[in-house]
Amino acid sequence: MRRRTQVPAHLLELVDDAGDGLVISSIHGRAESRTYAKSVEAGASSSELTPEEKQAVAAARAGEGNAR
């Protein structure tokens, strides 16, 4: 039987109306934690974005979320 574990993760996207900004992802495991920052220009990044990061950037550009 294969055991599937959930890894706690946090994602913060900071983009302006033009889609410029950054995405910060943090993944927490038992033995280590990793944090990544990726720049975003016009809604795209030179680094590969995960599906969750792409969705977060799209939501931020659409004005969805907790922007204040």
Image (spheres, rainbow, N blue to C red):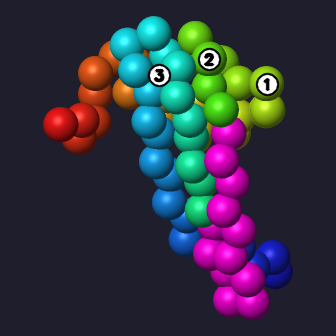
The residue to which callout 3 is attached is: 58
Nearest the viewer among 51 and 32 is 32
Per the image, the residue denoted by label 2 is 41
The image quadrant that residue 53 belongs to is top right
Report the side of 58 relative to 62 (left or right). right
Numbered badge on residue 18: none
What's the CA distance linking mark 2 and mark 3? 12 Å
Q: Are the two marked residues, 1 and 2, in contact with CB atoms closer than 8 angstroms?
A: yes
The first of marks 2 and 3 along the sequence is 2
User: In terms of sequence position, does the residue under pointer 1 or pointer 2 come before the other?
Assistant: 2
Q: Which residues are magenta?
A: 27-38
**Left or right, residue 20 beside residue 34:** left
Nearer to us: label 3 or label 1: 1
Write the residue at 37% across / 13% down. 17
Q: Tag 3: residue type? A: Ala
User: What secondary structure do most residues of the magenta stretch adopt?
Assistant: strand
Look at the image and tell me whether residue 6 can be seen.
no
Residue 1, relative to residue 30: is it above or below?
above
Q: Is residue 13 visible?
A: yes
The x and y percentages for residue 26 are: 60, 62
